């Protein structure tokens, strides 16, 4: 469990981090909870790690222009315990508490989780359901990527190689929104075998996102259409559950077969919709 | 039996101060002058011929001191198997060489091809990666039942059908067949007792050195039995004189059986230390632990239990394929045979039993004893069958057990119970533990709750397991007649210091069991001194005369009994010294609560004064040697037979198949108890390990022989939040044949618990109309869901 030799640089600004990324063989180190184990197994052997843990402000969580702004280096625990999040975005409070264990929550970061884009990670479903945008910065400045465009495949994202995530921006939901994150955990890793995040806005708009089910987290537009703007009752829930996962390639691996995972996803969508009723 | 109340008291563990404060001293903590570090080049393939090994680039890497391959070790023996089992036809088992490094072909993923020694661990790891090995992958076989079929790839070219041996025990098969044919009902179960990875928290670690002046080796090893390692390594592998080797097992972080065995790395590092003239250390990486620490279980079994019209068991017929992996590990051959077949009487009066075992080589990690070792497999088989039979015959599973229990016997007034499968049980009250378990669970109430739950569309199940095990391993003459190549006694030296403080040198080894507390309680109690005045020394072949180590729940029953023998000798000699001082006859001296007293008088001297007199013998019996220091060896007369009743109450989520454990009741009879807190801790840990097998754990090989869940991301260890509070109780049926009346508690929880859980899940499914016979362990939500959907 000894990684191959690598260089280590601790940067203090985002610009320095981006400059360091110009070297192909460089990886950003945030919480390190996915990267370091892979390096110890020598499955991943970057020549250099750039530690962004010391960048001022990158862990901040604040409200700005009608948005909740979560710095990319905020840990799962930072988010879970933050009053602003609890008041405006209880979905994140609830979901953050289900990530890994206490040690993982104290070290792992939201930016790291999103950039890694593990198909069974928790944050992707939550940011999708919340209608978030991922703020990234590269040599040409900042841009915002809607969460719906961010996850592009298995461990892959719309992030360019020389860009880093700086923040997650979530529009503050109007009063009356309800949300939940329902997760069936893989018993060993406690990643999601199937999980569903639902955000039901006061106007009846309903965002439904899954993680753990396909190659990447996704919004389920079929299920959303079946229930958006309608009262949540047995009929509309069944309609949403029936419509869910249409056209989705459901993963099959040694944690769960395709049939079981699909079944679980629907069970957890149903649980989630019951919660926001 | 206690003299100052220490025996039977829940004394806090004295070793915990150093463990809890991070001051334990483990093998990896030991750094010797001029220390070097080893890393291994291991086979990625499960079965592959070695075509070429190129070490040239690796040798040039920074810090590299030496690289050795199988060719360098051609003249060195492999590690031996400690138990000989013969084929049914009398032939000796097939026992192919288990080399320290493979030279011809790798037989399982992780098999060692080369060892690299460097100045630092990092350098050794980098250089090992630079060794280029050309291999030709060969077809492999991982499943025991498939390995014996014609045309299966051969793990060892000279072992036909991959069969190490076949073996049979019990009544003649014709008699069993006849009884089975006449049975009113036969319950049949085809099942797998899956392979488990032991996962001790401390990975295996060895540090070996050689002193050219004294020509002496020192091996620090994370072993459960340092003396046995010394014996095997010196006499069978390296051919070095035993008095030239010191083996030390310092603090060891858990073993569960996996650290009993003599591993190739121990002998190899010792060999290397002389070659390079410097100490060599290797600590297994966790990934290596998954691939190399001997696994447990892995039986494929067909079992049939026949009943008469009254529910009395009339016959048991068992056919098992036991997967031994690629090589015979130290005690692998006795696990599916003498630790499994001999336990198939269970707690029942079954008159006809036949068990047939075929032990098989496959391209997998070697399999050996793992907490319970054979006895969990036997218990699982019996307890699943009897619960399933109860469902099939529409009987209550508790009632069916009561009809079949061996009646109570104490082994003193009533004789021991002779089984159909070679053993004689020492003492037992089997209906007692089930009665107590039923009271604790409030049986009528939980059955009513189950019906109510079923009415409300919920699946609640109640599962039983009434188990027996053979512990206190073992009478040397008996195990010798069964093929064991060692004696299984224990030694203990009790040295009273001149000031009356006591040092005890035991051949047992503590790696989590708390011997430093339990053994000290016995000594302090019997000698009437303070607990603080007793020191327990273990794990060093130079401090302790000899030892057979700790496994098979033997430490207290065998090691503790050896201590008792030495205590008796101390007291006897003390009486002579006291008699001389008190001018009385030794026959008139009684020893009680730390004082030697002339019977019927107030003339008395304390234990401390006697000790001082023994070492300052100015006023001393002429015919007595000075000193107060006795060594003893204890060889037990029989195994001990702890037993108990475990009851699980579970709820199965209809939608997901997830099993929630609602209650777990464990009534265990481990004979007399020295420290109830430590016993309860052992039961808790054991129960968790058994439930781990039932619900979470299982090594999974793919068809290429790769262990696909070789990390904690994939291999599910049980965790605290998976469990309710356990409800435990004990019954005490003393062991009649050892001086402490103890039976052993280390494995009971693991042996009893798994079938209770699986039976409870099956019961839950039957309550919902799903008449399922078996679900393969671990009972993952998906498997339970499939069982419901498919039934």
Image: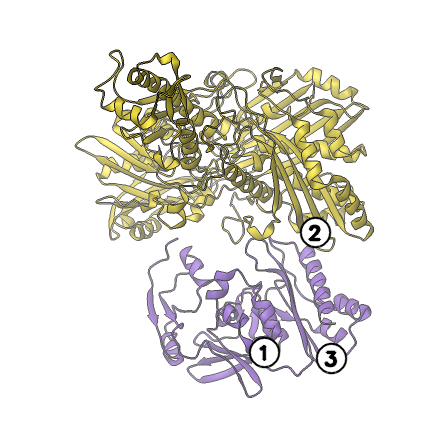
User: In the displayed structure, would residue B516 be above or below residue A53?
Assistant: above
* Label 3, label 2: how far apart the Cα atoms are: 33 Å
Which chain does the yellow colour mark? B
Tell which subunit mark 3 falls on. Answer: A
Q: Quadrant of the C terminus of chain B?
A: top right
Query: Secondary structure under badge 1?
Result: loop
Residue at mark 2 shares a chain with residue at mark 1: no
Residue to which mark 2 is pinned: B657
Q: Residues within 10 Å of mark 1 (few under 14, many from 20)?
A: many
* Label 2, label 1: how far apart the Cα atoms are: 34 Å
Q: Nearer the viewer, residue A1 or B672?
A: B672
For residue B768, side relative to residue B674 (left or right): right
Q: Residue at x 37, y 41 (%)?
A: B251
Residue B68 quadrant? top left
Residue B397, label in figure: none
Residue B693 x/y as whole percent: 59, 42
Residue at mark 3 shares a chain with residue at mark 1: yes
Residue to which mark 1 is pinned: A132
Q: Nearer the viewer, residue B613 or B662?
A: B613
Residue to which mark 3 is pinned: A204
For residue B421, side relative to residue B498 (left or right): right
> Does residue B770 show up?
no
Which comes sooner in the sequence, label 3 or label 1?
1
Which chain does the purple colour mark? A
Residue B248 x/y as whole percent: 32, 35
For residue B689, side relative to residue B239 (left or right): right
State if disc 2 and disc 3 touch (CB < 8 Å): no
Q: Residues within 10 Å of mark 3 (few under 14, many from 20)?
A: some
Q: How many marks?
A: 3
Q: Nearer the viewer, residue B155 or A90?
A: A90
Residue B328 x/y as whole percent: 46, 30
């Amino acid at each position: 469990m000894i990684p191959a030799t690598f260089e280590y640089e601790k940067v203090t600004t985002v610009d320095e981090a981006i400059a360091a990324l110009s070297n192909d063989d460089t990886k950003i180190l945030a919480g390190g909870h996915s990267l370091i184990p892979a390096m110890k197994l020598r499955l991943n052997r970057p020549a250099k790690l750039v530690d962004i843990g010391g960048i001022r402000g990158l862990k901040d969580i604040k409200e700005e222009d009608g948005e909740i702004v979560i710095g990319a280096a905020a840990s799962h625990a930072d988010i879970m315990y933050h009053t602003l999040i609890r008041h405006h975005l209880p979905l994140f409070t609830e979901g953050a508490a289900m990530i890994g264990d206490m040690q993982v929550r104290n070290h792992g970061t939201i930016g790291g989780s999103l950039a890694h884009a593990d198909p069974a990670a928790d944050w992707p479903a939550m940011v999708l359901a919340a209608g978030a945008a991922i703020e990234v910065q590269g040599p040409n400045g900042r841009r915002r990527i809607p969460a719906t465009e961010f996850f592009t495949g298995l461990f892959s994202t719309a992030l360019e190689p020389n860009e880093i995530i700086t923040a997650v921006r979530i529009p503050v939901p109007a009063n009356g929104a309800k949300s939940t994150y329902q997760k069936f955990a893989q018993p060993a890793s406690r990643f999601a075998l199937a999980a569903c995040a639902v955000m039901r806005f006061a106007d009846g708009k309903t965002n439904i996102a899954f993680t753990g089910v396909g190659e990447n987290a996704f919004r389920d537009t079929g299920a959303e259409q079946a229930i958006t703007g309608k009262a949540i009752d047995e009929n509309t829930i069944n309609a949403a559950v029936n419509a869910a996962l249409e056209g989705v390639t459901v993963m099959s691996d040694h944690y769960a077969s395709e049939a079981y995972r699909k079944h679980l996803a629907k069970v957890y969508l149903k649980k989630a919709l019951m919660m926001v009723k | 039996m206690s003299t100052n109340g220490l025996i039977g008291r829940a004394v806090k563990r004295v070793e915990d101060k150093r463990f809890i404060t991070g001051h334990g001293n483990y093998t990896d903590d030991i750094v010797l002058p001029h220390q070097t570090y080893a890393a291994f080049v291991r086979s990625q393939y499960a079965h592959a011929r070695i075509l070429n090994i190129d070490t040239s680039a690796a040798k040039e890497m920074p810090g590299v001191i030496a690289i050795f391959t199988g060719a360098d070790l051609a003249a060195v023996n492999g590690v031996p198997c400690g138990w000989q089992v013969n084929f049914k036809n009398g032939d000796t088992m097939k026992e192919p060489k288990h080399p320290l490094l493979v030279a011809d072909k790798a037989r399982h993923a992780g098999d060692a091809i080369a060892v690299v020694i460097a100045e630092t661990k990092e350098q050794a790891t980098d250089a090992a990666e630079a060794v280029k090995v050309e291999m030709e992958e060969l077809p492999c076989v991982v499943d025991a039942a498939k390995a014996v079929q014609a045309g299966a790839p051969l793990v060892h070219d000279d072992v036909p059908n991959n069969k190490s041996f076949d073996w049979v025990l019990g009544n003649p098969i014709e008699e069993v067949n006849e009884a089975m044919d006449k049975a009113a009902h036969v319950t049949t179960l085809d099942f797998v007792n899956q392979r488990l990875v032991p996962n001790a928290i401390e990975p295996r670690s060895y540090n070996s050195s050689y002193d050219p002046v004294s020509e002496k080796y020192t091996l620090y090893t994370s072993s459960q039995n340092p003396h046995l390692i010394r014996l095997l390594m010196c006499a069978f592998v390296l051919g070095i004189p035993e008095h030239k080797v010191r083996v030390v097992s310092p603090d060891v972080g858990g073993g569960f059986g996996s650290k009993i065995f003599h591993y190739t790395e121990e002998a190899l590092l010792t060999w290397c230390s002389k070659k390079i003239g410097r100490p060599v250390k290797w600590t297994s990486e966790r990934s290596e632990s998954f691939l190399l620490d001997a696994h447990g279980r892995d039986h494929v079994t067909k079992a049939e239990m026949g009943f008469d019209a009254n529910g009395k068991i009339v016959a048991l017929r068992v056919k098992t394929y036991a997967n031994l992996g690629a090589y015979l590990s130290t005690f692998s051959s006795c696990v599916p045979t003498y630790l499994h077949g001999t336990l198939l009487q269970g707690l029942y009066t079954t008159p006809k039993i036949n068990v047939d075992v075929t032990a098989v080589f496959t391209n997998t990690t070697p399999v050996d004893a793992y907490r319970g070792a054979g006895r969990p497999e036997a218990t699982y088989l019996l307890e699943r069958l009897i619960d399933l039979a109860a469902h099939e015959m529409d009987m209550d599973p508790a009632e069916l057990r009561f009809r079949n229990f061996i009646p109570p016997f104490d082994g003193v007034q009533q004789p021991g119970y002779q089984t159909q499968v070679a053993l004689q049980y020492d003492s037992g009250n089997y209906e007692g533990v089930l009665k107590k378990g039923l009271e604790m669970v409030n049986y009528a109430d939980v059955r009513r709750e189950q019906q109510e739950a079923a009415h409300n569309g919920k699946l609640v199940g109640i599962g039983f397991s009434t188990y027996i095990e053979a512990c206190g391993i073992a009478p040397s003459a008996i195990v010798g007649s069964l093929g064991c190549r060692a004696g299984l006694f224990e030694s203990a030296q009790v040295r009273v210091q001149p000031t009356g403080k006591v040092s005890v040198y035991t051949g047992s080894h503590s790696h989590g069991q708390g011997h430093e507390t339990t053994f000290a309680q016995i000594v302090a109690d019997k000698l009437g001194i303070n607990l603080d005045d007793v020191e327990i020394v273990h794990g060093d072949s130079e401090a302790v005369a000899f030892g057979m180590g700790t496994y098979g729940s033997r430490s207290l029953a065998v090691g503790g009994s050896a201590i008792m023998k030495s205590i008796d000798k101390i007291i006897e000699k003390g009486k002579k010294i006291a008699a001389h001082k008190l001018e009385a006859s030794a026959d008139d001296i009684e020893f009680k609560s730390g004082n030697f007293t002339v019977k019927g008088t107030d003339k008395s001297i304390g234990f401390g004064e006697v000790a001082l007199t023994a070492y300052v013998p100015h006023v001393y019996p002429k015919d007595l040697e000075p000193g107060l220091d006795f060594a003893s060896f204890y060889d037990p007369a029989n195994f001990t037979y702890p037993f108990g009743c475990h009851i699980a109450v579970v709820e199965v989520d209809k939608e997901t198949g997830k099993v929630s454990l609602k209650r777990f009741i464990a009534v265990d009879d481990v004979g007399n108890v020295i420290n109830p807190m430590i016993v309860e801790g052992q039961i808790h840990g054991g129960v968790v390990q058994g439930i781990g097998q039932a619900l979470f754990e299982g090594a999974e090989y793919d068809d290429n022989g790769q262990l696909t869940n070789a990390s904690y991301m994939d291999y599910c260890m049980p965790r605290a939040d998976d469990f309710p509070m356990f409800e435990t109780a004990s019954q005490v049926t003393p062991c009649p044949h050892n001086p402490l009346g103890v039976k052993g508690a280390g494995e009971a929880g693991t042996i009893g618990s798994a079938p209770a859980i699986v039976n409870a899940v099956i019961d839950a499914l039957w309550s919902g109309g799903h008449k399922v016979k078996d679900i393969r362990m671990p009972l993952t939500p998906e498997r339970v869901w499939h069982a419901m959907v498919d039934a």
